[in-house]
Amino acid sequence: MKCIFCKSSSRGSTSEEHIVPESLGNTEHVLPPGWVCDSCNNYIARKVEAPFLNSWYGRNSRFEMRVPSKRGRIPPATGLHPQSRSKVDVNLDYDGHLAICAAPGEDEPYFIRTIQLHKHGTLYIPAATEPPQSYETSRFIAKVALEILAQRCVNEPGWNKEIVEKRELDVIRDYVRRGRPGFVWPFHTRRIYTADQLFTSPEIPAYEVLHEWDILAIPSSGESNAPEFYAVIAIFGVEYTINLGGPELDGYKTWLKAHPNRSYLYLKGGDHNLLQVEA
C-alpha cells in the first residue's frame, strides 16, 4: 500500500486519517491506516488543516456551532468592542458562560478601564457566513476532496494503486502535500442551508447536519471525452465544489446552469455521505 499524497510506501503506518477533522465534529468518517502515511497525516494536520481551523472563519464557525476541538475546548470567537476600539476573544466555558478578554496584541489594561468607565457597552461578533476564497480554504478543501475519492474506493481491491498512479490526480495531490503559496485552486462556494438548520426523518424527529459530501461526474465537452470529477462538500451548511482533475470550474458552472443552481447533494435522494447529530 502507498500513501495517496506522497506516493511513498505506507507499510507500517498506524494513523487513521479523518476526512473532515475531528475539530469540525467528525469522529466517524476516516481512512484506514496506510491510505495516508503517518508523515503526511502529521504534515496535513499542521500545514493544511490548522490554517483553516484557526482562521477567522474557522474559529467563529466552530464557536457558533459549539463544536469542541480534539481537546474538548470550544475555540474563542473574535469580536470587536467599539468603546475601546479593541478586538476581543469571546470564550465559552464548559458551563455555557461567556468570558470576554482582549485579543492577543490588544491593550488589555485599556480595554478593562474602558469597561469600568461605562455602565453600558456594545460587543460585535460578526457571523461566520461564508469562508473567504483563500489559499488556506482552497488547500483544505482540496485535501478533503481527494480523501473523499479515496473513501469511495477503500474497499475495492486494487484501488489504492489506481488512485496513487492516476496522473490526473498528481496536480491536486501536490497542491495539498507541497503547497503553492499565492495560488488559490478555484472552488465554488455558497450557503445551501443555515448552519443550525433542523432536518427531520422518520427515525429522528430533529437533527442538524455537520457535514455531507458526494462525487459529481460530468461528461466532458472537450476532445478527450474524459469525464470531469468534482467533489461536492457541505460543512456547517456551506457547500464547496472543487475539480479533482485540475484547477478549473467551467464544467461545474455549466452543470449548475442546466440544473437551475440546485445542489447535487439534494438531487440523488440522500445516498451521499452524511454526518448528522440529534438536536
Image (tube, grey):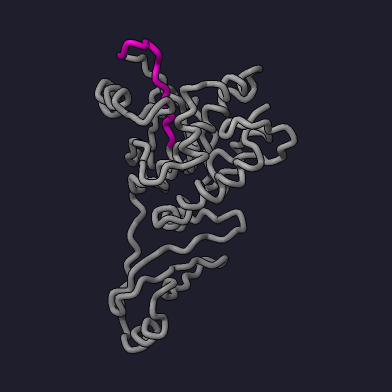
The answer to whether residue 96 is magenta is: no
Q: Residue at x 68, y 35 (%)?
A: 33
Left or right side of 185 for 158: right
Q: Residue at x 31, y 14 (%)?
A: 222
The answer to whether residue 228 is magenta is: yes
User: Compared to 80, does 264 lie above or below?
Assistant: above
In which image quadrant can residue 257 be found? top left
Q: Nearer the viewer, residue 186 or 127?
A: 186
In which image quadrant can residue 90 be found? bottom left
Is residue 177 something that shows in the picture?
yes
In which image quadrant can residue 114 be found? bottom left
Q: Residue furthest right?
A: 12
User: Compared to 187, does 110 lie above or below?
Assistant: below
Residue 263: image location, x then y, percent: 35, 30
On the rendered image, what quadrant is the N terminus found in? top right
Residue 138: image location, x then y, percent: 40, 41
Q: Nearer the viewer, residue 249 or 199?
A: 249
User: Compared to 17, does 229 lie above or below?
Assistant: above
Magenta stretch bounds = 221-233
Is residue 206 something that shows in the picture?
no
Q: Residue at x 44, y 73 (%)?
A: 100
Residue 203: image location, x then y, percent: 55, 34
Q: Residue at x 42, y 31 (%)?
A: 232
Residue 187: image location, x then y, percent: 35, 36
Count of residue discs: 0
